[in-house]
Image (spheres, rainbow, N blue to C red):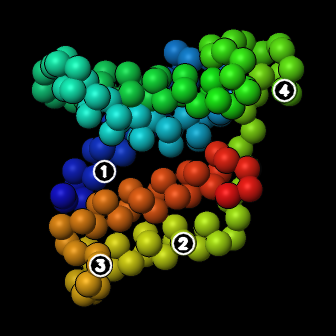
């Protein structure tokens, strides 16, 4: 995967996250977290829709639509669990701090683990550093794992 491909995936995910945040109003995640979840939603949408037999076509518009669908699903699931099972798409009101999902800073070990994974993957890709576990073929997977570890540390308190 080239750097340009990765940049396109991140851009599509960012647009999808913003759109999903507009569709699922009242989730309380905020713009930055909606964009981060949109990037993960892009992977979900591009995997899930073909599994369901739905083909949207090719091109950037189809990719944004698929990513937005994945991001909406992810936001709905996270908002459901973030409110103690009290329904999703609920706006404001209700207990639990007005129905808002509160992000927390990751613990120091989670931050260090994600940072080390990301730096090692980037060194393998750009510098050609040889690490037995991280190969040129799985650099993107290692970066995705680093991102998911950091996201889990932000979304779930105490991790």
Mark toward the start of the polypeptide (4 vs 2): 4
Q: Residues within 10 Å of mark 4 (few under 14, many from 20)?
A: few
Which type of secondary structure does the marked residue at label 3 adopt?
Answer: loop
Q: Which mark is residue 7?
A: 1
Q: In x, y percent, where is residue 96?
A: 84, 26
Mark toward the start of the polypeptide (2 vs 1): 1
Which type of secondary structure does the marked residue at label 2 adopt?
Answer: helix
Q: Viewed as shown, does residue 121 lie left or right of 51?
A: right
- CA–CA distance in space, label 1 to label 3: 24 Å
Q: Single out the mark in the foreground, 1 or 3.
A: 3
Q: Viewed as shown, does residue 42 lie left or right of 88?
A: left
Which image quadrant is residue 88 in?
Answer: top right
Q: Viewed as shown, does residue 131 lie left or right of 17?
A: left
Location of mark 2 (residue): 113
In the rendered image, is residue 86 in sight? yes
Mark toward the start of the polypeptide (1 vs 3): 1
Looking at the image, is 151 positioned above or below residue 38? below
Q: Residue at x 39, y 27 (%)?
A: 70
Q: Residues within 10 Å of mark 1 (few under 14, many from 20)?
A: few
Q: Residue at x 45, y 35 (%)?
A: 38
- CA–CA distance in space, label 4 to label 1: 37 Å
Q: Residue at x 86, y 20 (%)?
A: 95
- CA–CA distance in space, label 2 to label 1: 23 Å
Q: Residues within 10 Å of mark 3 (few under 14, many from 20)?
A: few
Q: Which mark is residue 133?
A: 3
Mark toward the start of the polypeptide (2 vs 3): 2
Q: Are marks 2 and 3 in contact (CB under 8 Å)?
A: no
């Amino acid at each position: 995967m080239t750097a340009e491909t990765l940049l396109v995936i991140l851009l599509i995910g960012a647009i999808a996250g913003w759109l999903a945040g507009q569709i699922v109003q009242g989730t309380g995640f905020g713009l930055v977290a909606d964009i981060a979840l949109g990037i993960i939603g892009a992977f979900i949408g591009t995997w899930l829709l073909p599994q369901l037999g739905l083909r949207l076509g090719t091109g950037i518009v189809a990719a944004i639509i698929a990513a937005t669908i994945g991001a909406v699903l992810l936001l709905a699931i996270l908002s459901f669990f973030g409110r103690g099972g009290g329904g999703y798409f609920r706006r404001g009101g209700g207990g639990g701090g007005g129905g808002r999902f509160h992000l927390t800073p990751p613990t120091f070990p989670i931050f260090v683990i994600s940072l080390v994974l990301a730096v090692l993957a980037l060194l393998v890709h750009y510098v050609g550093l040889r690490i037995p576990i991280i190969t040129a073929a799985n650099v993107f997977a290692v970066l995705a794992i680093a991102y998911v570890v950091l996201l889990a540390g932000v979304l779930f308190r105490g991790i």
